[in-house]
Image: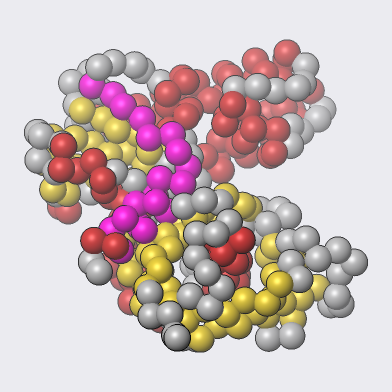
Amino acid sequence: MEDKTIYYVGIDHGNHLMKSANHVFKNGVERLATKPTFSGNTLIHEGVFYKIGEKRNSVKDSKLADDDYYLLTLVALAKECQSGAIPNGARVVLGVGLPLKHFAAVRKPFVRYLKREQNVKFNYEDAQYNFTIENVLVFPQCYAAVADKLGDMSGEYLIVDVGSWTIDIMHVKDGVPVESKCETFTESMISVIQGIRSKSSELFGKEISEDVITAFISNGDCNCAEKYTRLMESELEAFAKKVEGILKENGHDTEFANIIYVGGGAKVMAAYGRRGNNIDYVVDVRANAKGYEYLARQLA
């Protein structure tokens, strides 16, 4: 008997990392001329071989400029299948997101981009997959990270999404986003990581690798000389102060406003930013992906 169950999959198409409810992987896509020796991280789509997630792609002016984010979406589905969240052959509704700044202009093109094939077939890591894309629902990424908490938000809140390429600030009143007060700024985690690497090269003649920096941000640990740890701490503290400065410059008092930091930079703000009873953090980097999935289910 045909399984008519609809499965909901939230996917966060990051400028650094791809996230689903159960997986996080780098957004690198490398097209290969021939079949690779090892099948790990290997996608085969329409007869072409790709290595996925072995590095980070450069930031694109538009995520729709090429096929990379479509291919990354297929891999996210395969990974969710591998972990048992959805069965192979599932009918799927994708919950995805966009930054506040681009939401209105890019939402429909992003849906068309991801729905280019209703029935998708591909191979990933020596397994064959097929899924039916029933629908694609798009949500604001900052909003999604706290979607399951909005009902408990009495009064005014600022949701500050410190992301890999932008900082989004969403004003929420009594659990309802105030669209006219939503703002986007071009400060980012990628910028601070690049700054750390540049300064390390300037001071010590060696660049700290991006993987070491992101691991330090994630768990506060670094298997390296103390001088590199001190440099990273100093630059991350400066970044946290810069984020707080952006809030203050735009009329938000960090001593009194209820603030919830989300996104990849939430851990930086928790470790190096101002603390207070009015400040909270959502440090799960998969929060937006989980939020997209939650919101998509609510529309079922």
- Position above or below: 17 against 120: above
Query: Residue at point 85% right, 75% down?
Result: 35
Question: From the viewer's perspective, is 22 left or right of 282?
Answer: right
Query: Residue at point 34% right, 16% down?
Result: 275
- Counting every numbered tag in the picture gives 0
Q: Most extreme residue toward the front, as rendered?
A: 1
Tell me the magenta residue range: 278-296
Which x, y percent locates residue 226? Answer: 73, 13
Query: Residue at point 77% right, 21% down?
Result: 224
Which quarter of the rendering shows the C terminus?
Answer: bottom left
Which quarter of the rendering shows the N terminus?
Answer: bottom left
Based on the picture, tell me whether residue 106 belongs to the magenta stretch. Answer: no
Question: From the viewer's perspective, is 89 left or right of 246?
Answer: right
> Which is nearer the eye, 300 or 212?
300
Q: Is residue 17 visible?
A: no
Which x, y percent locates residue 231? Answer: 65, 20
Which x, y percent locates residue 47? Answer: 74, 85
> Which is nearer the eye, 225 or 175?
175
> Which is nearer the eye, 128 or 135?
128
Query: Residue at point 17% right, 53% down?
Result: 179
In which quarter of the view is residue 44 placed?
Answer: bottom right
